[in-house]
């Protein structure tokens, strides 16, 4: 099993550009999550999903969108990139509530 | 509101010394507490969880509901314990079901 995979690993965007961060898992997990990690701030939940077709906002959803058309994939969309979105983005999945979350390797995004 | 506090951003000890990473939480319900660890150039992974009450890599953590704490302890630190440690809180009900709230992390360095 590959576990949780994320692409790309690094990306530099200009202000106003858009992009999609890809996340996939092959563990048949129902729950998937997107976090951002800012220096010294821990992980903040952006969006999460409890199953295909079901998504909900986390603590910091502004400027992002998600979709969950399949159990395996949970892409995160940035429509108008801003410098405040410079961060490391982690995708995670878990079988259900309270279970261990498995993390991807992260995507380091810089918006200039 | 749910909150996790890790008061120490950085913690340094010498090999063989005891180590304690502090974690306090705020939650009105019945909490689930976790410690996640991120070694250099590796992805975030679960170290231990309070309901399993087990020792992993010599680390233990006891949930103290009276003090709302979940401190991580190891009697004899090893160099390979050097990593970033995150305390995380899971909730048992309501709209936040299935989510984790992370502290800002403590960077542990164990000197030879």
Image (tube, coloured by chain):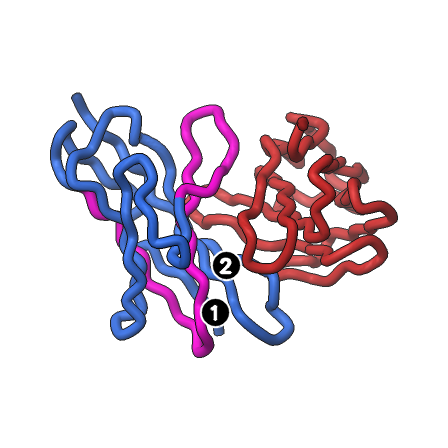
Chain colours: A red, B blue
Quarter occupied by the N terminus of chain A: top right
Percent coordinates x, y for residue B76 in the rendering: 16, 35
Quadrant of the image occupied by residue A6: top right
Q: Any magenta on residue B31? A: yes
Residue at the image position 21 percent from the left and 47 percent from the top: B20
Label pair 1/2, CB-CB below 8 angstroms: yes
Query: In the image, which residues are magenta?
Result: B19-47
Locate residue A40, reporting x and y percent: 42, 45
The residue that mark 2 highlights is B101
Q: Is residue A112 at least partly visible in the picture?
A: no
**In this view, A31 is above or below A72:** below
Q: Residue B2 carries which label?
A: 1
Label 1: how many Cα within 10 Å (few below 14, some 14–19, many 20+)? some
Q: Residue at x 31, y 62 (%)?
A: B63
Which is nearer the eye, A44 or A23? A23
Residue B31 in the figure: left or right of residue B78: right
Residue shown at 47% from the left, 54% from the top: B102
Of the image marks 1 and 2, the number of the one nearer the N terminus: 1
């Amino acid at each position: 099993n590959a576990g949780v995979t994320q692409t790309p690993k690094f990306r530099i965007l200009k202000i106003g550009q858009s992009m999609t961060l890809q996340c996939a898992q092959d563990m048949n997990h129902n729950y998937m999550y997107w976090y951002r990690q800012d220096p010294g701030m821990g992980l903040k939940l952006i969006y999460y999903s409890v199953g295909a077709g079901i998504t909900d906002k986390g603590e910091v959803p502004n400027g992002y969108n998600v979709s969950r058309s399949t159990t395996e994939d949970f892409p995160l969309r940035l429509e108008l990139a801003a410098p405040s979105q410079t961060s490391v983005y982690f995708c995670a999945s878990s079988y259900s509530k309270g279970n261990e979350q498995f993390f991807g390797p992260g995507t380091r995004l810089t918006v200039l | 509101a749910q909150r996790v506090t890790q008061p120490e951003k950085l913690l340094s000890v010498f090999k063989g010394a005891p180590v304690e990473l502090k974690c306090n939480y705020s939650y009105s319900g019945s909490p689930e507490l976790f410690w996640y660890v991120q070694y250099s150039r590796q992805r975030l992974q679960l170290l231990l969880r309070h309901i399993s009450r087990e020792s992993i890599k010599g680390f233990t953590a006891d949930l103290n509901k009276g003090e709302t704490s979940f401190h991580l302890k190891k009697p004899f630190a090893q160099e390979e314990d050097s990593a970033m440690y995150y305390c995380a809180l899971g909730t048992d009900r309501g709209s936040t079901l299935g989510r984790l709230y992370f502290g800002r992390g403590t960077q542990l360095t164990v000197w030879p």
